[in-house]
């Protein structure tokens, strides 16, 4: 029986009177990569933030893999690393110093980084292809370079669980492939990765998929299962078709029906 890394019990999140997440319950397996997909406004990012403990929520989120003696926020930060959308860092910080921020949960208050911290930062920067420009201020980086530096910060934590919200934002295809290789290496080491992705074909390369809409989980299953493919096609109103090519599952865009195209043309030309 697979171990559980994260367990959500009836998790709900509201903004004023608006219910963003509606009683979500799910188990995320340890040592696996789970992708979370769905249309805009489905509640994907909110769910990930709730799992990370970053937003107030009703219900409960448990980390069964957290050691019994680990009771502090620092303990949790060692166990679970976070990479969010559009995260900021002071523009004058070097890329190397940004990666070292990932080591803060491992250091005593105001203690300088030690050899293990420097080794972890270097390993993370090399894994993301950012080592050669480690001395550059992060404020001088392109969007894709900045994303790779922030990914290095998350990797430097060396956590058992990594939660990543849109980690491929601003990355070109070669660096998306690098990210994919990094995730597979992490899972190969027994780590757990949970990622919100808009790149559905890449999301289909995960071990498992959570399909969301309207603040709820509509389906959870293996990425290779036909039921997962049907749920994915349904949630996107059959505007994508899941097909296998060269041993991999891909989500291919489908044109709208003639009626939809006619309506769109009429609206656009009215």
Image (tube, grey):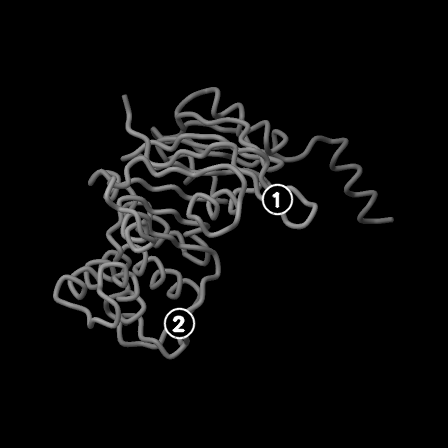
Picture layout, residue 126 above or below residue 269: below
What SS does tag 1 mark? loop
Cα distance between the residues tagged 2 and 1: 30 Å
The numbered mark, 2 or 1, whose residue comes first in the sequence reads: 1
Where 229 falls versus 44 (above or below)? above
84 vs 16, left or right, is left
Residue sitting nearer the eye, 73 or 145: 73
Q: Nearer the viewer, residue 39 or 97?
A: 97
Q: Which residue is mark 2?
A: 141
Q: Is residue 248 left or right of residue 97?
A: right
- Per the image, label 2 sits on a secondary structure element best described as loop
The reply to whether dot 2 and dot 1 touch (C-beta < 8 Å) is no
Q: Residues within 10 Å of mark 1 (few under 14, many from 20)?
A: few
Q: Which mark is residue 270?
A: none
> Horizontal and vertical percent for residue 47?
50, 42
Quarter residue 28 falls in: top left
Q: Give the residue displayed 52% in from the left and 42% down from the top.
A: 44
Q: Quadrant of residue 128?
A: bottom left
Q: Residue 237: x percent and y percent?
A: 63, 31
Q: Residue at x 74, y 37 (%)?
A: 261
* Residue at the image point whose x is 61% and y is 44% from the top: 41
Residue at the extreme right of the image, as rendered = 270
Q: Which residue is mark 1?
A: 41
Residue 74 at what x, y percent from top left? 30, 55
Quadrant for the N terminus in the image: top left
Left or right of residue 23, residue 33 in this image: left
């Amino acid at each position: 029986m697979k171990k559980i890394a994260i367990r959500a019990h009836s998790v709900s999140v509201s903004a004023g009177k608006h219910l963003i997440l509606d009683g979500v319950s799910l188990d995320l397996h340890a040592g696996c990569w789970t992708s979370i997909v769905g249309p805009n406004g489905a509640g994907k990012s909110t769910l990930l933030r709730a799992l990370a403990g970053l937003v107030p929520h009703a219900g409960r989120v448990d980390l069964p893999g957290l050691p019994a003696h680990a009771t502090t926020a620092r303990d949790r930060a060692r166990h679970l690393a976070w990479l969010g959308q559009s995260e900021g860092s002071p523009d004058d910080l070097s890329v190397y110093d940004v990666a070292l921020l990932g080591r803060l949960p491992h250091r005593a208050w105001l203690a300088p980084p030690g050899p293990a911290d420097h080794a972890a930062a270097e390993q993370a920067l090399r894994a993301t292809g950012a080592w050669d420009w480690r001395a550059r201020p992060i404020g001088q980086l392109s969007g894709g370079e900045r994303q790779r530096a922030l990914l290095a910060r998350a990797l430097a934590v060396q956590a058992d669980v990594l939660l990543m919200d849109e980690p491929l934002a601003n990355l070109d295809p070669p660096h998306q492939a690098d990210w994919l290789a990094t995730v597979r290496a992490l899972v190969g080491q027994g780590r757990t990765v949970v990622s919100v992705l808009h790149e559905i074909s890449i999301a289909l390369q995960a071990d498992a998929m959570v399909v969301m809409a309207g603040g709820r989980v509509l389906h959870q299953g293996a990425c290779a299962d036909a039921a997962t493919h049907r749920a994915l096609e349904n949630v996107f109103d059959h505007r994508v078709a899941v097909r296998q090519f060269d041993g991999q599952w891909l989500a291919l865009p489908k044109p709208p029906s003639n009626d939809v195209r006619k309506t769109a043309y009429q609206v656009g030309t009215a």
